[in-house]
Amino acid sequence: MSTTTQGALSAATTNQTAFDAVRKAKQKDILFATGGLVVMALAMTLLLALIGDLVIRGATRIDYGFLTSYPSRLPERAGILSAWVGSLLVMLVTAFLAIPIGIGAGLYLEEYARKGWLSNFIEINVSNLAGVPSIIYGLLALGLFVYGFSLGKTILVAGMTLALLILPIVIVSIREAVRAIPRIIKEGAYGLGADQWQVMWSYIIPAARPGILTGAIVGLSRAIGETAPIITIGALTFIAFLPPAPVTGEFPFISFAWLNDGFTVLPIQMFNWVSRPQAEFHVAAAATGVVLIALTFSLNGIAIWIRYRLRQGYRN
Amino acid sequence: MTDTTMTIDKTKTDTQPAAPTKAEPDMPPAIKPAAERDPLRARIENFSFYYSNGFQAIKQVDMPILDRKITAIIGPSGCGKSTLLRSLNRMHDLYPGNRYEGKVILEPEGENLIGPEADPVLVRLRVGMVFQKPNPFPKSIYENVAAGLRVRGIKKRAVIDEAVETALRRAAIWDEVKDKLHGSAYDLSGGQQQRLCIARGLAPNPEILLLDEPTSALDPIATAKVEDLVQELSETVTIVIVTHNMQQAARISHRTAFMYLGEAIEFGDTNQIFTNPKHPRTESYITGRYG
């Protein structure tokens, strides 16, 4: 032992040194915790102040008329009907495209793809894509979908653009959800003689379901607030009609004509009103902001609720 | 046991294997008759295993697995005992780059489980496995036991009901869970979960059941229950158990193999290995000189 060679160092001194070290470490702990608390409080206050300001200015403007009117050049008659319907339809397209493709890609990359330089390359790129500024996706969509494929400035194109935008987010979160499944569960299933398909359908997907759904919803809540790519592809800022209804009275009862219609969405409506000189339009913009935040929060709320529900019971 | 559930179980024949056991150089003639008397369930022949990084974890192992006997594999950490066990139902195939050499012959058909023509999924249908840590699926107790049957495409409710009860009875856990079959398997204690996992492995009637240190995560009482259970089961199913607990091997197994650095140093009747080891390494291991 090294202490025996240093007989001069008494037990008391050693203890004293150790106590001092512990006390210093504790002081650092307290310092760090206090600093963290201050920073967090600052961030939360700012966020709450922003939302509070929006609510105070806009909440009173929200009424039945606001939600059921088209935009108007008269601020007191302006409403967000076409904007929220547009947002809803664009989200529908986005969800319909991004969720199945994202789940498929995530499961394939995590479970089926041969691990090697190619899968590493794809993984890095998918993660990078999640951080690409959204306006770049808008430019891509403008060049490819609007002009390249001549699809026009339609709901379909907006949905496709936002789907592209959130696809990396969805893929990354699905891969994480799948990776979080304990290896021992997968081996248990394989050990029973299950093949890869059975393991994926009966074990991996059910176990990863909370993570998969959360990823999908977090992606959608990002998409619903996106403005830049939608402006880039040329969404209309003033629109006083609704797209054709997806459900019709006559056979085959479902119509996809709305996909090819012009549209606007909530963030663009808001953007449009903010850039007007009249103060009344600014109130309308704040009200639109409140609706948008409420939508985003409820999407996140649904995600949290799903996660909580699915974690609770594995009963059947 | 019910015949309805025997989807893959071949009738257990008592016929002698075509080829007699390869005599190990260290094996004294005194225990040979036992090896000849008991029918073989599997033969591991000149078996080597390489991990994807090129490391040879198993080196030319020869080992007979006797029908409806408990074969224990002991040895210090990292000796390759779990690797050998996991080779027997092709678990290494789940990770790319791993490589087998030699033969693992399943008797009496004489099929080579690690041959190129053997499908790992089909091998796992015949050779079941219980893992080190209890790993029930996040499902009900009933669905856990039924999992192996569902994997085999069995859908008839009555058949599954019966197989689940039979397996839970065989795993000596029926009385504890019969009133909460549809409750979550996660509500069971660790020891119960492990016995549930044994029931899950038994339900499809495997020809061999592999146990990979099944009690290492359990307390002494739960361990005793699992040991009793394993001994009972050996009347009906062939068992290979890996354990780092020598007393456990001595208590429950019929035959013991001692492995060291990827080699099977000695193999023989459990009594002989523990009372009269032939190899100096075996002796120093079981007397606790290293491990």
Image (cartoon, grey):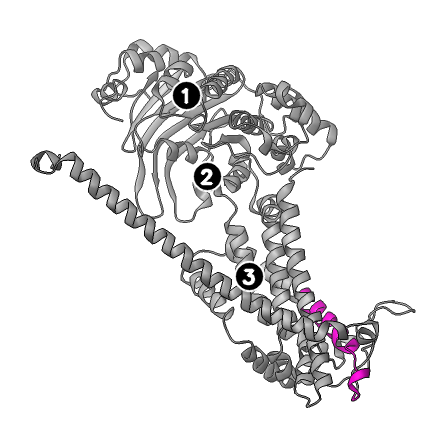
Q: Main secondary structure of the magenta part?
A: helix
Amino acid type at image mark 3: Ile
Same chain for the residues at labels 2 and 1, yes or no?
Answer: yes
Q: For numbered disc 3, what is the local secondary structure?
A: helix
User: Who's the residue at 34% across and 22% down the image?
Assistant: B257
Q: Is residue B24 above or below residue A96?
A: above
User: Which of the pair A54/B34 is nearer the observer?
Assistant: A54
A301 is higher (above) or lower (below) than B43: below
The residue identified by callout 3 is A171
CA gap, disc 3 and disc 2:
28 Å
The residue carrying pointer 3 sits among few (fewer than 14), some (14 to 19) or many (20 or more) residues within 10 Å by Cα, namely many
Which quadrant of the structure image shows residue B241? top left
Q: Which residue is mark 1?
A: B71
Measured in 3D between alpha carbons, the distance from the residue under mark 2 to the one under mark 1, in whole angstroms, is 19 Å
Kindly identify which chain the residue marked by label 3 belongs to: A
Left or right: B214 in relation to A304:
left
Q: Amino acid at mark 1?
A: Thr
Please tell me whether mark 2 sits on a helix, a strand or a loop: helix
Mark 3 to mark 1 CA distance (whole Å): 46 Å
Numbered tag placed on residue B139 in the rendering: none
Q: Are marks 3 and 2 on the same chain?
A: no
